[in-house]
Image: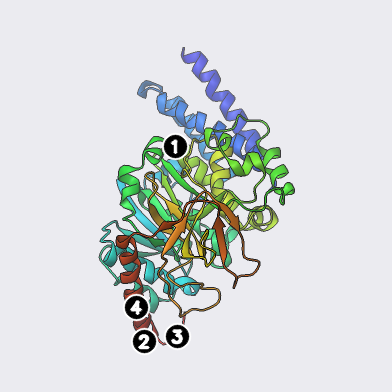
Amino acid sequence: MDETLTHLVRTIAATSGYFVDNPLASSEFGQMGRRVQILRQWIEARERLQDSLADLARELASSIDETTLSLFPFLPASPDVADDALSNFRRRFDPGSKGLVIPTGMKTFRYACHLIDNLRDTLGSDLPIEIMYAGDADLPLEYREFIVQLGPNIDAIDITQIFDDSTLDLALGGWAIKPFAALASRFEQVIVLDADAVFLQQPEKIFDNHHGYRATGSLLFHDRLLWQGAFKERHEWWERHLRHQKPSQALSNSLVYNEGYAEEQDSGVVVLDKSRLPILLGLLHTCWQNTKEVREKWTYKMGYGDKESWWFGLELSGAEYTFEDHYGSIVGTLSTEEDRVCGFTIAHLDEKGRLLWYNGSLLKNKAVDDLLFDVPTHWMMDGVWEKGARKQDMSCIRDARVNEVEREERSVVEKSVARAREIDTRIESLGSDP
C-alpha cells in the first residue's frame, strides 16, 4: 500500500513540476479550470493520508504549494516550509463566521454609506461588515473613519496589504476588487455586496433559510434576459472553454447559455461558503480572471466587467453552484399602458418569490440625477424585457403579472431614503463630494 501511495505522490510531484514549467497563457480559461480540478483532487488526497504517512503528506503538500502559487501567484507564500500557501491562507477565515463585504472607494462611497444604513438601521441586520478598499488614495483615512462609525461591528480593510498587487492593480481595477474582497475576507461564509445594492429583507436570511445556498454553498443572481442571439462570439468562447467537461446542473438549466441570451449574472450580490473546497477553488479561478492581464485581454472584453467571471470560475472548476430561480425582475412604476412595469433597476427574489434586493441605489437613476430618490410602487418578473436605448431611458417588463410593492417593503425604502438624505448632509461635512 505504501509503495502505491509513494508512486502516486511522486507522479503528482512530476505533474506539479510540469505545471510550474508550463504556465498557462491568459487566454486558457478552460485549462486553468482543469488544473484547478486536479489541484482539488490532490488536496483531497492529502486530507485522506494517515498520520503514519507524514513524510508522504509533506511531499504532497510541497507539490500542492508549487502548483497553487503557479496558478495563483497573488496568494501570499506560507512562512512555514512544511505548509502550503492555500492551507496557510485558509487559516485567515474564522471558522463558522458569517458576514458582509462591501468593496468601495471614493466613487461609490456615498452609496456604500446608504447601504450600511439600510442594513443596520432600517433592517436591523447585525451581520459584521468589512469595507474593502485598495490603498489610501482609493479611500482616504477621513472617509474610512466616517464609514466605520455608521454602525457597530464595521471594519475597513486595505486589500493591497493582503495580496501582492503587482499583477492585480486593484486600485484602478474597478470591478476587479470584488472577488479578491470575497477571498480576503475573514468571514468563512460571505455575502459580497455592490455599494449601490438596496435590501428589502435582512441578508442573513440567505444564510439561514435559502435551500439552494445550503445545498451548494453558493448563491448567484441572474441578470435580465436580453439581446437573444446578439453575442455569438461570447457564446462560442464559453462553449470552447467548456467543451471538455460535463455541464453542471446550473448550466444545464441556463436560458442564457442554452438559448443564446446575452448576460447570465448580476454580480451585485454574491454569496459563497469558503469552507467548502470546491467553492473556494472556484473563487480562486474567478480571482485569476480578474487579474490585470487576464481581465484586460479577455474577461472584460468577453463580458461586462466581473459579472460572468463568478459562475464561469465555479463552472470551469467543477463546483456545483446555485442561481436564483428567476431571471432578473424589475422594480419601478406602473406604465401608463398598465401592462408593464418600468424603471432603472434590476430586482431579485427570495425562494418564496418575494423581493429580496435590487441594484442601482436608492436614487431613481444615479447615472442621470444624483439627487432624485425614488420609492418603487410596482414590480414584475418573468416577462419580456424592453431595454432602454440610453442610460437616461427607462427599461420595462411586459407580458407578465403586475405586482404591487407591499407596504412593508415600501416602508423599508422610504425609511432608507430618509436616512440617506441625513447621511448625505453628514458626508458634505467631510469637505468634498464623493
SS at circle 3: loop
Q: Are marks 1 and 4 in contact (CB under 8 Å)?
A: no
The residue nearer to you, when weighing 419 against 130, is 419
> Measured from the top left, where is residue 240 in percent x and y?
71, 38
SS at circle 4: helix
Amino acid type, callout 3? Ser
Q: Give the answer, above or below, for where 15 lies relative to 140.
A: above
> Measured from the top left, where is residue 169 in percent x and y?
58, 63
Question: Is residue 26 found left or right of 338 in the rendered image?
Answer: right
- Residue 429 - label: 2
Task: Please count the marks in the image.
Answer: 4
Residue matched to label 4: 423
> Measured from the top left, where is residue 148 in percent x and y?
32, 70
First in sequence, mark 2 or 4: give its number: 4
The residue nearer to you, when weighing 168 against 282, is 282
The residue nearer to you, when weighing 159 against 30, is 30
Residue matched to label 3: 432
| Residue 176 seen in this snapshot | yes
The residue that appears at 29% across and 56% down in the rendered structure is: 127
The residue that appears at 49% across and 78% down in the rendered structure is: 370
- Residue 277 - label: 1
Amino acid type, callout 1? Leu
Amino acid type, callout 4? Ile
Q: Give the answer, above or below, for where 147 lies relative to 275.
A: below
Q: Give the answer, above or below, for where 322 lies relative to 76.
A: above
Q: Are marks 2 and 4 in contact (CB under 8 Å)?
A: no
